[in-house]
Amino acid sequence: MVPHLITALTGPINELEQRILDSMPAIERWFRLEWMEHTPPFYCSVDIRNAGFKLAPVDTNLFPGGWNNLTRDMLPLAVQAAMAAIEKICPEARNLLVIPENHTRNTFYLANVVQLQRIFHMAGLNVRIGSISPEVKVPTTISLPTGESITLEPVVGTKRRLGLKDFDPCTILLNNDLSAGAPGILEDLHEQYLLPPLHAGWSVRRKSNHFRSYEEVSKRFGKLLGIDPWLIHPLFSHCGEVDFTVGAGMDALAAQVDGLLTKVRRKYKEYGIHEKPFVVVKADNGTYGMGIMTVRDAKELQDLNRRTRNKMGVVKDGQAVHDVIVQEGVLTYERMHDAVAEPVVYMMDRYVVGGFYRIHAERGTDENLNAPGASFVPLAFEHSTHLPQPGVKPGASAPNRFYMYGVIARLAMLAASYELEATDPDAEVYE
Amino acid sequence: MVPHLITALTGPINELEQRILDSMPAIERWFRLEWMEHTPPFYCSVDIRNAGFKLAPVDTNLFPGGWNNLTRDMLPLAVQAAMAAIEKICPEARNLLVIPENHTRNTFYLANVVQLQRIFHMAGLNVRIGSISPEVKVPTTISLPTGESITLEPVVGTKRRLGLKDFDPCTILLNNDLSAGAPGILEDLHEQYLLPPLHAGWSVRRKSNHFRSYEEVSKRFGKLLGIDPWLIHPLFSHCGEVDFTVGAGMDALAAQVDGLLTKVRRKYKEYGIHEKPFVVVKADNGTYGMGIMTVRDAKELQDLNRRTRNKMGVVKDGQAVHDVIVQEGVLTYERMHDAVAEPVVYMMDRYVVGGFYRIHAERGTDENLNAPGASFVPLAFEHSTHLPQPGVKPGASAPNRFYMYGVIARLAMLAASYELEATDPDAEVYE
């Protein structure tokens, strides 16, 4: 079940793994205390890159798709976590409405929605799928290549509630990241729970906010463990007033890239790392692996070709990019067979419930793997995330490695929790 | 993984299974609401008998042993449930002390303690084992046939706290059912959490209290599902002032047995069941499968042989029996190969985390299987308890059957919760 990892289980990251294993009770207690103060996102997936000498989350998705890529063995954990989540949010819940993305023709995505429906049904809810796509005007049943089928129904809104014909949910679960902005029908739903909240959508969310929160989390966690937070944190900076389509703001961006490369170079020197530093420029509001570019030298920004400029200028749902985040590139030294791999960890409520490897045969170790051509290999997290094996030599055991991934993923989830608190438009501010 | 069940998946119980599956969201919601009002026992195992025409819990253990009989696949569920339990009871917990039974030579039992230690360690606690056995005077490491080892340490009590040398726990987990009464060292521990509470021990607990609570639970659940609660509830009565060793009170007991057999006969007639009714006489304070006798006719009580009288007169730790419960016997029609089998379901906090079949090749379908010679076959509950398969023909799917077992086991756990509330010596009574 555990995929064969060619380089994952070697290298200096073993020291960090050992430190994390040795500190397990302290780490778990630290998370428990954090979750007393902060509410975890309802669900979440985190992309992790393991460079052998450092390990860091590079993307935190608050509307995770890909639940269908988890193994069947993980389903009971997801169901149990869903039960815990429901119990906290709305114990008297009967009906759950799931609002998916509008990709009604992407059967991979729809298989993910079917899996979410299954998880929440098994947790004891009546679950139906309400589409906000203008194309879905009547209940539409779609057969999937998996042999499953899914029925999308048009949502019906009244002044204060959202539902389907003959279906009044107490909770609405968004699996739609609202890149194009929240439709009016989702606003002012004060009688129903809307999860995640609207400000978790990409029309409000910014990667730079997330990584600022993550920086804070990684510093506190680094203190707990007595480690340099850089070992788990990608350096970054934010750059505004950029317009790739017309080439505006490129000098400022080049300066940011150069500055960050210098910082990374210094860190590499400190740790005796003989790799070439690189940065990743990402749209601050980007998702779906869109609007991402690897830069090894600031000069590359001087003559971007039209294709790259177009790619960087507009992201999902046609949203223009004016702000970018320049992030320290973290190599991934995980491979499966010949393909570059990166682990993706799935969480529900505060629990790690599974994960998979995203692999891409045509991408390099310093490139974004979330791109057409990627495939997915489920991780046997069921024997792993909570199942470290004390006493086993560091790096020698997949379960211990996966426990570490689960810890880093939960740090990113905690950062998302801080981020959502800071960006909550309804937050009460005491000054 | 799923054992081959010869008769389990046929018969009229399929109707009940269908009803339970159809009502899943209502059932889960009902449990959620119950757990808002009542605290589940910290952990619990329930023996279930499936007669094909009815299905009932026959024993609810609040200090479950046998955790080592669960499959490795269930471990992540147990760990996740343990995390949820700790978070609720004592989020700031660091150290957990487990107090086992005094069977320091029973390696099967010790393997169970090792498994409990593993579960709570993986949930993020420092776990050590504190023995209250007078034989354990210094830390004693015992090697088990499994290749594992366990260190038992003598408990050290101060006026208000209990711990080990250099180990101060915030929570003490009893895996000792206190049949002989709670030792003084466990009393007056007001600064530490003691789980389960002392009044869950068999020096206080009575089967008749439990089944009275279960009767109430089954009536309410029967109403929810629109079924006769008898389908999930064994009829019973209580009989005091019995002394098997001198043959006292046998007439009164015979009358009780006769009365209950008549009631069962009437029920069998109502449902057209052509089985011979029987009852099981059990010590009201008995555990470990001790003090249990199958009776098919009240006349059998007139001439009990010396061996039976001795067996019934004294139970675990030499406790004398003066009160018995006369319980409707529930056949078990589950078999594995040629051996009679009964499912045992394990729960942690409010979650079903696993189970196994207890099988006994030398016992009949109307006999107690919890006896020397029993063996254990893990159930693949990881694919099951929370994973019913809607749409599958009733009786045709092990997962659906296991979901039903998990529901019945949780009803018994809820009854234990009512029972502990009613017998709590510190309960505040508002009159």
Image: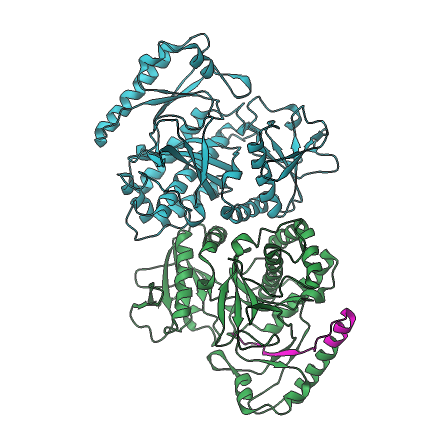
Chain colours: A green, B cyan
Vertical arrangement, residue A45 with respect to residue A327, above or below: above
A426 and B281: which is toward the camera: B281
Vertical arrangement, residue B147 with respect to residue A376, above or below: above
Expressed as whole percent of the image width and height from the top left, the position of residue A90 reads 46, 53
Q: Is residue A10 visible?
A: yes
Vertical arrangement, residue A21 with respect to residue A283, above or below: above
B338 and A306: which is toward the camera: B338
Residue A92: within the magenta? no
Q: Is residue B190 visible?
A: no
Give the residues drawn in magenta, as a range: A264-287
Residue A272: within the magenta? yes
A56 and A80: which is toward the camera: A56
User: Which quadrant: the C terminus of chain A?
Assistant: bottom right
Q: What residue sits 57% from the left and 45% below the top?
A: B88
Residue A385 image-quadrant placement: bottom right
Residue B357 image-quadrant placement: top left
Q: On the picture, is B238 further left or further right than A403?
A: left
Expressed as whole percent of the image width and height from the top left, the position of residue A26 reads 68, 50
Q: On the picture, is A178 further left or further right than B335?
A: right
Expressed as whole percent of the image width and height from the top left, the position of residue A388 reads 61, 51
